Image (cartoon, grey):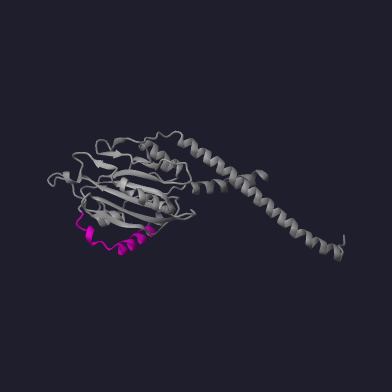
Amino acid sequence: MRISHSSLISLCLVLPAFGFAQMSLEAIEADSLQLEMEALFQAQMDSLEGTLTFYEDTSLIIGGDMAMLHIPDGYMYIGPSDSRTVLEDMWGNPPNSIPSLGMLFPENFGPASEFGYGIDIFFEQEGYIRDDDATDIDYDDLLRSMQEDTEASNEYRIQAGYEPIHLVGWASPPYYDSQSKRLHWAKELEFEGYEENTLNYNVLFLGRKGFLTMNVIGSIQDVDLISKDLPQILESVEYLEGHRYSDFNPDIDDVAAYGITALIAGKVLAKTGLLATIGLFLAKAWKILLIGAIALGAGAKKLMGK
């Protein structure tokens, strides 16, 4: 069939409109799928949160007979097994060899919430930490070294199936209180594939045989809220008799082969004599899982449509 010149012009005018209509329809379907997947994912998170047991306005012993935790005002606590559910099943972190002693959450934002943060509590029995080097640390040089180490570790994270991490810088520079033996600092981390940068705010309590850590996991936007609550967080842990820094006995206790600098850098001298990385790179990464679920759902829908 022969097409007239005027018909060809008319067809050219109609085709773009048809193409835009198709694009608009696909965009609507994609938005609808995303909303559906978000609702399903949030329902799953809410269901998991419903299995957790929360404690508020009380004090309890953690780590066997090691320390007393005074739950700060405005926070709620979950125990070790529930913490594993949050960190691995809800937030998508890899399993960790260091067992959690529990987690703290702001009372208005549970682990299923898109907003807010969590505080993972754990103890590392590395021996008595000498703090002689605390006054000699160049934090700018230390940051550069930590950034290099973080980039070097990405090869292993990718091989294990996890997204690369980039250390952006200090969200709060390190500070050590030599009287109370408390150390705290905050790092800003970028997880590839995640829209917002992650905050790792570390609060360490030095003890006789190692250090108890509160690792704050949240968005970089949470740094001001955490800084505001930092005074009561610093007062929330009390070592029991026999576990305090002052209880150290040089005749029978082990001394760590590193000091404050290595604690901040996340490096310790392993038994082999080589440097091994310590510390947790965690993310409240359920949105990363959600993105993957949406993509998977879109692929399934295309297959079913064939």
Q: Residue at x 69, y 51 (%)?
A: 25
Total marks drawn? 0
Q: Residue at x 29, y 43 (%)?
A: 236
**On screen, 74 above or below 18?**
above
Q: Residue at x 87, y 60 (%)?
A: 1
Which stretch did the figure color magenta? 131-151
**On screen, 168 above or below 72?**
below
User: Looking at the image, can residue 245 be seen?
Assistant: yes
Please tell me which residue lies in front, 296 or 38. 38
Q: Residue at x 23, y 57 (%)?
A: 134
In x, y percent, where is residue 93? 42, 46
In x, y percent, where is residue 299? 60, 47
Q: Is residue 144 magenta?
A: yes
In x, y percent, where is residue 201? 36, 51
Q: Is residue 28 left or right of residue 195?
A: right
In x, y percent, where is residue 127? 21, 47
Q: Is residue 155 left or right of residue 236?
A: right
